Image: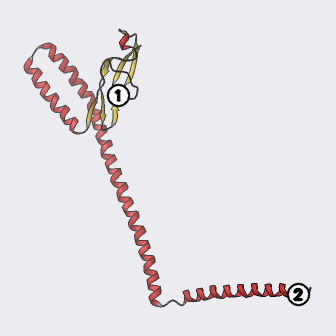
Amino acid sequence: MTTENTEKNMNQENTATDNAAQATVEETAVEAAETLTPEQKLQEELAQEKDKFLRLFAEFENYKRRTAKERIDLFKTANQEVLQALLPVIDDFDRALIEIKKSEDDILLKGVELIYDKFTSTLTSKGLEMVSVQAGDVFDADYAEAITQIPSPTPELKGKIVDVIEKGYKLGDKIIRFPKVIVGN
């Protein structure tokens, strides 16, 4: 039994020696950190300042991108509101052209058509486009609004657009007013 006790004591002493050695290494590292030369301290401070600068610079770049995107979205939204306000004017022009054609006054018709063409080309240059929906097209709820359904006059028009009541318009890829249509049942 004395041999076993001796081995246990030796293992405990080795463990204690290892722990003491590890503690000494850690203390030496702490002391070394405390006893940095002024040059090393300055280099460490410089590295910290560089890190702060890089983080601040990245944050500023993100801020610039975000504000630029918000500004573009604001311009699109402001433009959209103005164009939506002008859509009833386009509708009035369309109705006026139909009535003027009935009157057979060619000079008046040419004058109104010139104004209408200039007005629509200006709106087109600002990004406004008409949604192309015609009678006979298959009805798609993603691109048109059905205001009513009627019995289809012919079997071919079943589930298709029978008449377009009001034109639709889109600004870029976004539809700002859906065309109002009648669908055959």
Taking depth in this image into account, of 118 and 173 the one nearest to the observer is: 173
* Residue at point 30%, 42% (across, down): 78
**Amino acid type shown at disc 2:** Thr
User: Percent position (x, y) of residue 112?
Assistant: 13, 25
Q: In the image, is residue 174 above or below residue 46?
A: above
Question: On the image, which quarter does residue 21 sit in?
Answer: bottom right
Taking depth in this image into account, of 21 and 36 the one nearest to the observer is: 21
The residue tagged with tag 2: helix, strand or loop?
helix
Q: In the image, is residue 82 above or below residue 3?
A: above
User: Percent position (x, y) of residue 102?
Assistant: 16, 13
Is disc 2 surrounded by few (<14), some (14 to 19) or many (20+) residues within 10 Å?
Answer: few
The disc placed on residue 147 is none
> Which residue is tagged 1?
178
* Residue at point 48%, 91% (across, down): 37
138 relative to 16 in the view: left or right: left
Label 1 – label 2 distance at C-alpha: 97 Å
* Residue at point 35%, 51% (across, down): 69
101 relative to 157 in the view: left or right: left
User: Percent position (x, y) of residue 182?
Assistant: 36, 17
Q: In the image, is residue 61 above or below residue 172?
A: below
The disc placed on residue 3 is 2
Taking depth in this image into account, of 158 and 60 the one nearest to the observer is: 158
